Amino acid sequence: METKDSRLSNTVGTKSTVLKPSDVEILDMRIETVDNKETGKGGEKVVFSCKHPQNKDAIEISGVKYQKGDSLETSGLWYKVDEDGKINKDSVLSSFLNFLGVESIEEVGGKKVATISGNKGFLVFKAY
């Protein structure tokens, strides 16, 4: 007779594991291919591995809240290049890098960046 997995009878707890917005330290970064839910097509997104003061393990952040005209927008950090192979000047990623005062993604490593809750409750970078 098989042993029943005791996790199947586990109940919902009372403690939240939601991380509060805080400054995080950028530990590492990568570009990964993901499905873009907005367009239905695959795209490349920059994902940053970060140290959050509430969490012993690194967390991943791939979105940003930024100023666009008179409003605040939240977007993924999509990796898009222009005809010269450079990061597209009009992209959200470019806006984020400019906000941090750097020119390349790798220059973000080691920086402390503020976070805020995004539209879906996940932490995103605060770039405004």
Image: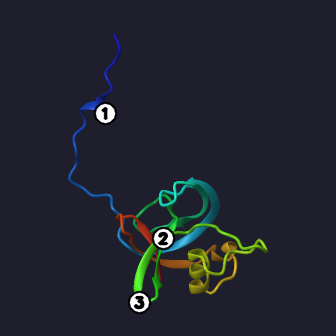
**Foreground disc of the pair 2, 1:** 2
Q: Position of residue 6 (x, y in %)?
A: 29, 29
For the view shown, which residue lies furthest in the bottom direction?
Answer: 70
Residue shown at 48% from the left, 58% from the top: 57
Please tell me how crowded label 3 is: few (under 14), some (14-19), or many (20+) other residues with Cα within 10 Å: few
Q: Residue furthest top?
A: 1
Q: What is the C-alpha distance between the residues marked 1 and 3?
A: 49 Å
- Residue, disc 3: 70
Identify which amino acid the numbered label 3 is placed on: Asp
Q: Secondary structure at mark 3?
A: loop
At horizontal 33% and vertical 62% (from top left) the residue drawn is 18
As helix, strand or loop, the secondary structure at mark 2 comes to strand
From the top left corner, tell me how far across and down residue 75 is, in percent. 48, 70
Looking at the rendered structure, the kind of residue marked 2 is Ser
- Residue at image point 72% right, 74% down: 82
User: Residue 75 — which label?
Assistant: 2
Q: Is residue 7 above or below residue 66?
A: above
Which residue sits at x=69%, y=74%? Answer: 87
Mark-to-mark CA distance, 2 and 3: 16 Å
The residue that disc 1 covers is 7
